[in-house]
Image: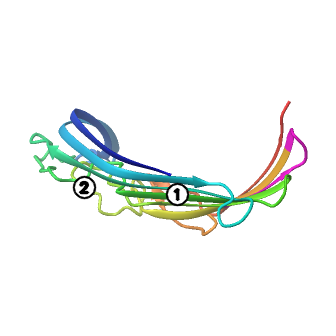
Amino acid sequence: MRVSLFQENLADALISQNSTIPGTNTIGGSVQNIDRIRTRGIELVAQGRDVLLRRLDLSGSATYVNSVTLSDPAFRNAANVLTEVTGKNTPNIPKLKLSGLASYHYNDRVSGSLGARYSDRVWATLDNTDVNPNTYQGFDKYFVVDARLNYQFDKKTRASLGIDNLNNRKYFLFHPFPQRTVMAELRHGF
């Protein structure tokens, strides 16, 4: 188990963001120079073998981040209007991210795993005006579960069957992410 505390102070940070070009429906990208940003957080990571049951491995992480703009008096939004961004969330950084993975090894050939991922929504604009995260160019919060079953034929050959987004969550991370997806894999090493 590991716990990490962190803080980062940035001066003259470069932040890339997309926005509508004023007077059009065209989306353009730009890089903004931000005067000062502060990021503070805590991360907990844990991993264990034979947890609660023999052959059950568990791992997971939890990260909380508070990242805000401390100062940028010259920021102008997409409409070229001077806008206050002090105290706003830094784009593309979720406040909370969680992940967990449980793997069970039935025997030397058969194993299965179940994983889960969660992320808070993130802001895509410096002034946090992107208020509809559930759309194209939005960054929605999500909770997804993935499952996988493996069969090891020998040292070089393995077959796997997996389902990503088992819970069929609809969410956007700039574009719609795939819903429930079934995958099969046959792997052989040479």
Q: Which residues are magenta?
A: 147-157
Residue 86 located within the stretch drawn in magenta: no
Residue 143 at x, y = what percent?
51, 65
Q: Residue at x 20, y 46 (%)?
A: 69
Indicate whether 181 appears above or below 20.
Answer: below
Kind of residue indicated by mark 2: Asn
Q: Find out whether residue 156 is within the magenta segment.
A: yes
Residue density around tag 2, few if under 14, some if 14–19, many if 20 or more, within 10 Å: some
Across and down, in percent, residue 155 comes to: 87, 40
Q: Which label was assigned to residue 99?
A: 1
Give the x, y percent position of residue 181. 67, 59
- Amino acid beneath label 1: Ser
Q: Nearer the viewer, residue 184 or 130?
A: 184
* Residue drawn at 25 percent across, 53 percent down: 89
Tell me the mark number nearer the camera, choosing from 1 and 2: 1
Position of 47 compared to 82: left or right?
Answer: right
**Quadrant (top left/top right/bottom left/bottom right) for the C terminus:** top right
Instruction: Name the chief secondary structure element in magenta.
Output: strand
Determine whether, in the image, residue 168 is placed left or right of residue 53: left
Q: Is residue 48 rendered to the left or right of residue 158?
A: left
Residue furthest to the right in view is 153
Which residue lies under the disc numbered 2? Answer: 128
The residue lying at 47 percent from left, 59 percent from top is: 98
Image-based side of 11 in relation to 187, left or right? left
